[in-house]
Structures are given as structure tokens and as C-alpha cells.
Amino acid sequence: MTTIAFLGLGIMGSPMAVHLAEAGHTVAGYNRTPDKTAPLVAAGGRAATSVADAVHGADVVAIMVPDSPDVRAVLTDPGGVLDSAAPGTLVTDFSSIRPDVTVELAGLAREQGLRYLDAPVSGGEAGAKAATLSIMVGGDGADVASARPLLETLGRTVVHVGPSGSGQTVKAANQLVVAGNIALLAEALLFLEAHGVDTTAALEVLGGGLAGSAVLVQKGEKMRTRSFDPGFRIALHHKDLGIVVDAARAAGVVTPVAALVAQLMASAVAAGDGGLDHSALLRTLERLSGR
Amino acid sequence: MTTIAFLGLGIMGSPMAVHLAEAGHTVAGYNRTPDKTAPLVAAGGRAATSVADAVHGADVVAIMVPDSPDVRAVLTDPGGVLDSAAPGTLVTDFSSIRPDVTVELAGLAREQGLRYLDAPVSGGEAGAKAATLSIMVGGDGADVASARPLLETLGRTVVHVGPSGSGQTVKAANQLVVAGNIALLAEALLFLEAHGVDTTAALEVLGGGLAGSAVLVQKGEKMRTRSFDPGFRIALHHKDLGIVVDAARAAGVVTPVAALVAQLMASAVAAGDGGLDHSALLRTLERLSGR
Amino acid sequence: MTTIAFLGLGIMGSPMAVHLAEAGHTVAGYNRTPDKTAPLVAAGGRAATSVADAVHGADVVAIMVPDSPDVRAVLTDPGGVLDSAAPGTLVTDFSSIRPDVTVELAGLAREQGLRYLDAPVSGGEAGAKAATLSIMVGGDGADVASARPLLETLGRTVVHVGPSGSGQTVKAANQLVVAGNIALLAEALLFLEAHGVDTTAALEVLGGGLAGSAVLVQKGEKMRTRSFDPGFRIALHHKDLGIVVDAARAAGVVTPVAALVAQLMASAVAAGDGGLDHSALLRTLERLSGR
Amino acid sequence: MTTIAFLGLGIMGSPMAVHLAEAGHTVAGYNRTPDKTAPLVAAGGRAATSVADAVHGADVVAIMVPDSPDVRAVLTDPGGVLDSAAPGTLVTDFSSIRPDVTVELAGLAREQGLRYLDAPVSGGEAGAKAATLSIMVGGDGADVASARPLLETLGRTVVHVGPSGSGQTVKAANQLVVAGNIALLAEALLFLEAHGVDTTAALEVLGGGLAGSAVLVQKGEKMRTRSFDPGFRIALHHKDLGIVVDAARAAGVVTPVAALVAQLMASAVAAGDGGLDHSALLRTLERLSGR
């Protein structure tokens, strides 16, 4: 069994830490708002009082925080992971952040003798709770191999996609495809509604052919009935599309469809829909059509 | 058993007519280029010498031709279906054409005492051969019910989606989603390649989560390896996106993503890729990125 | 002096007919709603009771109606121009319509022994009143030469741009550029407002450099102060962008920016802004930004 | 007369420094590649050996370098302006950089007791040589007033648009409009060419109406004849559009047309056209149309 520091116990991190504790590992969890530690404690884990307290004695440091500056702070702030972790510790960042920041932070970690994986996940709150996440892992093969048992406690699909930063790159690509598929399904649904088609039947037949997708299966009925409780919030998907557009630009890849979808997602945030499920991107397209 | 005239024996129509003949129906097939009748004849059907010859004595007239003007000609030309079919004949148009033209032609057919269904299909040549097409049917419920046994000979998913034209509307929505999903996957793949990620592993993990889609399953590897033999040709998808954009405009639905994807597909045609599989839309995005 | 039938006395046609009458020509004007003839009569013209009545005895037939079907009706309806005009009559269509329809109608006119010019105008109601229109003329050089004195009575810039239909093509290009320039100025203005910049000063400096344009001069202050009384209505510009997108597609020209701007203009119509000046496209972009 | 340090003597900075020297000011110029100082020396200026050497004794420090990191380095590197300039010195940054970086650097300068203006320019090499630049100035009103005589030595339009950063914001808006106008003119021109219209005549008539613009006047003929020697290089405009898209996103302004044009400009860079004049964006649209 492994001694694990889990930093960040939000909607995603909390059930992930719980799964690790329930699997018999020694888990010390830390969250800025301390009341989030209750589920972990109930599962046999420990509520740490600081990053340093959690990291002390850990073999593995897991991180699950919202954005690039948060990961940077957890690692580089005084008393942070770089200050506190023993050489050889395996840092695994599950957050979805900028690939270039990951590459930089992985370098800093290695200078301190730490090992570093980026392991962003897909599958949302439901996947975190059910331990069915898809996990896209960037880093050294040996580190991935040693982390795999833990990762498979949390997800169904664990794939090593390349060196440090690659996990973040694949996650960015994932968010590009998902946001775009939502936008397309929204346009299609409004198109069908405007023509008076039976949309239940239409979604069934679309799902049976080449237009079928996980977005259609998981979000189609939510969109048809305008049930937009999150799920994965628009504000976070907006953040992710910022990463996509910047990383594409930096790599010299032209992605006009992603750029347009990013504008639509920004419009959803501007309209105050940031707290809704990302399938509520439908509402932006509805507004565009004056509906 | 039913007496069927099958008009249009191309890549899609030929295997469909063969399935009907093999199911025991009496099928007379007609094609402008007569050598296309060979598979039908081998399956026990008859090669008709004209539309009128095929239609004479038929209970059902099946049509599978490329575009709106072709369906119009088959129906309204001298000696066409409207001239030749007996009252009560069930005309079933499998072609993918403009919804407004379908509504108009269905009206003309009804004035002649004919019954009329629009029944465009999804699933491509492979689906036609395997009789696993998705068929989206517009028309009167009673007519759909009487056609259902024949339609289920040809497809796995047969859904009545609304009155005349609704099948075409759903097919248009299908083509919108499919083209968009291809464009997004192309952008994602080029993004991953530019960052040096292992794309085989990346497609696996994308496919396991919310980014998963039939396009990813059926086209992902073709795109990764640039294997663009059709399949469904870009030229046809370009035609379909013209229908989508026009029908959306007519209905007052704003579809910016579809409009942009339609421009990319037009670019693929302009670049001479019209004869390739629609997954070759990747090449347009590759050119945009100077690759 | 010339005997002129002027068909269509709306916002544009009325002042144009008045200018011709004031220049000493014999002008018979016809409009479906007959009260629109008053200004022409006050200027010494005659109120005709039908197209045929106006056309009878005319050397020149001028047409200024809203859309392609209207021009077609004026020409081809029973008692229309093709029925009523004497051989050799010079038909000059000032309307902005589809280039392909113009080519077709010009052919029909020539079959009747008529001469035909397409002469769409730019400059709007103000240009019509001030006789400062830009007129883009398609047709035979000899016909353009004979029409030039009349055209220069109406506009400041009269340019022969090619054979029949070319005037419409150039007008379509004009509408593409104008709509796009409005959209860009709208985005720039909202960008400046969001950053708290002094927009009066900013528009001054933008206007002094490479960002300067007629749109900025004529529409910038209207947009800054949200004064959207027409002017040229959004509904008409929406019609024109439909022509642009279709004609580009037909010609195999890929115009992604025009296609996107056409979607924004369609959104303006869908939102109920069709009756406002086209500079009110700003409102669509404002809505996108949740303002 | 004023003692001026001019840092950055490239295509733009060199003629600007020369104008200041010719106007009788004492100008010390510094450039990383020292041979660029020749024109300034010929005009009576002095070639400084370092930033510190140039800044020593200067009342005004002018900066004209390519991008945000360059301005940062000039100011904050050891021996840079912040280290070398006497309290009260007026720093005037003519570079086009990120507004947020300007705000940050202006704050650092004020902490050192320096005064700071952002004064990006529009008008290109030609405007720099002819001293007809448009200069958009952000900063305190008193500082703008004291700098105005120098600024009017360099440009024809000098406008104070708001507090620190506002000049950069207006410049970003300028670049948005200019790039978009180029893209639209490119689409219009290809549209006209594809229809066989006389493009010389067409550009004349477009220029006479609401489609007229400085881009059409200055770039229309270059685009018509494919004469793309710079002028203002695509690589720089690409940089500027990155600023625009980021700043719009940060301000919560949705700019879909700008985002699309930014993708097209990125495509021009990816295709290797970065060294051509920005009007060569036409080539990207040409490639899209397979021409």
C-alpha cells in the first residue's frame, strides 16, 4: 500500500481521494476550504492542515486543482510540494492545465529530484465517483508503470500518450472535440426543432449512424429538454478552450472550427451561463437564432 | 411479396435493390447507364429499359439518385413516375435532397393519387451492402407502416420522424453533425501531431470518453494514416452541406459552425479532393496549417 | 430628352425618378401602392396605372424593386415589360438581385429584341436623394454608352464592369465588404468600450490610418451612440448576403469570413432587428458578449 | 530642444529617430545590431553603445521594438531603462504590445519615479518615413501634453485615448479592423475574378461607395496584381492578432470575426508567407479556393 498526499478535494478530487483510501492506501488530504475533507476522513483518510503536512512522508503526491496558476502555487509556494516532498516522490497532477506550464513545472520538479506525471482526466464528476475516468498520462514510461495501479483505481482507461505535457495536450484535444460536438448537436437540434421534426425520433436515428457520439448519448436528452444542471460547467470548458486555442497557435496549427467554438463558449460565459452544464452551449445558439 | 421498381442503381442503389430481390420481391431496376443492372439481374431481378418500363405494374417505386434535380427528373419528365405509376403506388425516395423540393414533389405525387415517402439513409456503401442503414422516414404514418417491412430489409434503424420532408431534414442534420465531427477530429489530430503526441494512444483515450463518436471509430484510423479511399465522397457531402445551410437559412436558424464547416468542405472540393472520402477534410485543415 | 418608364417608386426609386423628371425627361412612374407616385408627379412626371401603361411609348424602362422574384414578375408577368416594351427599348434594372437571375432575364429580354443593363447602385437613400450613387453596370458597351447620360443624372460614379450580370456580381462583392466592415467595426467598438477607452478619440485615430473606411465615417458615430434608424435595412442586407454566399459557392470561391458575417446578419434578423439600419449588426455582437 | 534616447532603430524606429534629430533634438540611438545607427548619425544623432549609454542624461526615452518581451527587456534588464533613467524622465513606448503588459510596465516605471506613455503607431514604414503616422496615446493627460510636440514631429494624427494601456488597446482594435478589411477585400476580389468581372473597374466602383476603405486604396491594386513586397509583414500582424484575441477574451468581449481572421493570418504564417505584406493574406484565401 502507498502513502498518498491528495491536494485539492473539490468535486473531482474528493471522490478520487476517497477511492484511494477505500482501496487501502494511506491518504492525507488537503483543501484550502477544510470542510471538504469530510468524505475522505469518513473513508479512513486523514485531514491534513497544510500542503506540507499532507506531503510529509508521502510516496505519491496527487494534485487536482482548477487551473495552471493553482498547480503552480501548490508546487512552488513556500511550504509547497517542491519545498516539502522527499526526493523520489512521484508527483501526479490530475488537473487540466496548459501543456507548456506542465512542461515547465515538471522540469522544476525534476530539478528537485522528484518524479512527475501529468494525468488529466475525462469523464467528469460521474466518472470520478464511479472510478470510470479516462486518464491521459504524460511522463516517463517507468513512472507511468509505477503509477498505473493507483491510476487504475480511479479510471477505466489509462493511456500513456507521451512525454511530460502530452497528457495535457491530449486533454486539450479532448476538450476541443467535446465542445465542438456539443455545438454541432445544438445547431442540429435547433435546426430540427425549427422544421417541426419529432426530435426524440430524430436523435434516435442520428445516434444509430455516423452522427452518433458520446455527446449525443450523454447530452442529447438534456439538450432536448433544456436540463442543464452540471455536470461539467461551461466556465471550466471556457478555460479549457483558452488552453486549446493558445496551444494550437503556439504549435502553428490552424484550427478555425475550434476557434469559433471557443468564441461561442465565451459568449455563454458572457451571458451568465458559466455555472450551467456545458451542454447549455445550446442556449448561446438559441439566442443567436432569436429563440 | 411486392412488385418494386428500383430507379437508380449506383453505389448505394445497386446493393439495396439486390437485397430486395434476395428477400423474394419482384424487382425491376433501371439505371441511365444500363451496365449497372448486372448485380440485380444476378440476384433474380429484371433490367428495365426505361423508367416507365420499370414502373409499369409496380406497387412500390424506390428512387436512389444523386441530387434534387435528378429526383425531379425521374418523377416529372415525360414517361417519368408521375406519368407511369398507377394510383395508390407507394413512391419511396431514398435520395438525399432538399427538404423543400421533397415537399413540393410529394405534393405533385399526391395530386396524381400516389403515396409518397422521403426515406434518406445514413451508413454509406458499407451500410447499403450490409443492410444496416439508418433510414429516416418522412410522410404519413400509414404509408410508413406499410413500407416498414421493405425498409427493414435494407436498414437496421428505421425511424418515422415526421411529415413529408422530415426525413430529408433529419438527413441534413445528420450531415451537419458528421461533417462537423470530421472537421473537429481533423483539427484535434493535427494538434496532437504537431505536439508530438502518440496519436494511436491519444485516439484510444479520446474514444473512451465524452469525445468518443462513430466518426472517431470509423474514420479515426483512416485519418491518422491518411487512407482516404471512399467511402462517402467529399463532393456529395459538399452537396449536402449546401442543403443544410440553405435549409437553416430558410428556417431562420443560425448555424455558424455548420456554415464554417461548409466552407471547409467547399475548399476540399476546390482543391480537387471531391473524389476522396469525406474524412479527407483533414487535408484541407492540413493545408491551412501549411503541412 | 428621353421617355422613361420608372417601375418601382420606393425609398430608392422615388428620388431617382424625381431626378430624371427634374432633368427634363418624360417620366411615367408605376408603383404597386399608387400613393408613392406623388413626389414624381410633383416633379412633373406622370402616374401610370400599370406596368404596361408606363412602358407604352418609353425609350428606357428603369426598374427598382426589392428582390429577384420582383424583377422577374415585372418583366415576365402578363402585361409585363416583355409583353409591353417595343423592340430596341433599353431596360435598365437598378435592383440588387441574383447575378444568375439577371443573366437569365437579360437573355429573355434580348430574345424579345430588347436591350438590357443591370445597374445596381450603392449609396443608399442618401445617395439616391443627393444623386451621388455609385452605379455598377453590366451589359453591352454600346448600351452602357447610350445609358450613361441618364445614369450620370443619378450617380457620381458610373462604371461599366463587364457583361450582363457583372453589375450584380460587383454589387454582391460590395455588400460582402460593407457587411464585413460593419461587423469588424462593431467588434472593435465593443472591444474598446470593454476596456474603458475614450471611443470618440479612438474612432478619430482609427479613421486616420489604415483602419479608415467609409463605414467608419458614415456609421461609426451611429454605432457609438446606438442610433440605428435606417438607412439601409438589415433585412435587405441579409437578402444580399444570401446572394453573396450562393454566388460564391456556385463559383467555387471559398469565403469563410463572408459566410460567418452572413450568419451574424441572419442572427440580427432572427432577433427582430431586420428593420434597423445595417449598422445595428452591432447589437448582435453586443448580445454575443452579454451586453 | 529635448535630449532623447531612442531605443530600437529598425524599419520604423530608424526614420522616427532621424525625424527627431532633424527637428533639432539631441538624439542618442541604440540598437542591438549597431549598423542600424548610420541614418541617425547622418542626421546629426549619436550612436549609443548600450541602453544605459543612450538613456544617460535623456529627458525622453523612446522605445520602438517588436514585441512585449522586448519592451520588458529594454525596461527591466540590468542596465535597462528602469536602472538608468533619472526620476521624471518621460518614457514613451511606440511599440505595439499587449495592453496588460503595458499596464504592468507603466506601473513599474512609476514606482521608479518615471513618467510613462504607450504610443503605438499606425501607418507603417511609409508613415514613419513621411512623418504621417497615426499615434494613439495612453497615459496621464499632463504627460501627453508635454510629449505632444515630439509626437507631432512624427505623426499627423496624435490622439490621447485614455489611461496607460489605452493606446495599446486602440492599436489592437486598429489591427483587428485592418486585418479584417484585408480578408474581406481578398474574398471580394477572388469572388469577382471567379465571375470574370473587370476587377480594375470593380475596385473603382467599390472604392466610391460604402465599401471604400484605406485598405482598398492602399492595398487593392497590390492585391489585384499580387505585389506583396512589404510594407507591414504578415508575421507582425499575426503577432498583433494574438494580442487582439487574448485581450478580447480577457475583457469578456466575443469577437468571432476577429477570431476567424486570426486563424487565416496564422495560416498565412504557417504557409511561409510571414515575410510578405499583410495584403498577401489574399494568398491564404486563394489557397482555400484551390487557386
Image (cartoon, coloured by chain):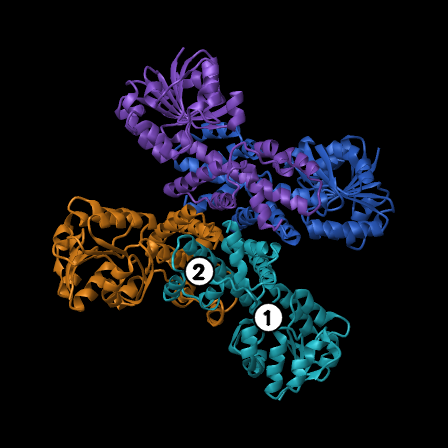
Chain colours: A cyan, B orange, C purple, D blue
Q: Residue flagged by tag 1: what amino acid is it?
A: Ser
Query: Which part of the image, by quadrant, shows the C terminus of chain D?
Result: top left
Residue with the mark numbered 2:
B181
Q: Dot 2, crowdedness within 10 Å: few (<14), some or many (≥20)?
A: many
Evaluate whether label 2 is on the same chain as label 1.
no
Question: Which residue shows up at 56% across the image and 82% down it?
Answer: A153
Q: Of helix, strand and loop, which one carries label 1?
A: loop
Where does the image place residue A215, in percent across and percent down from the top left? 47, 66
Q: Quadrant of residue B177?
A: bottom left
Residue with the mark numbered 1:
A164
Question: Which residue shows up at 16% across the image and 52% down it?
Answer: B85
Is B2 placed left or right of C104 in the picture? left
Q: Chain under label 2?
A: B
Q: Nearer the viewer, residue B92 or D245?
A: B92
Q: Are marks 2 and 1 in contact (CB under 8 Å)?
A: no
Is B129 placed left or right of A2 in the picture? left
Where does the image place residue B4, in percent across and percent down from the top left? 17, 60
Where does the image place residue A249, in percent across and percent down from the top left? 57, 55
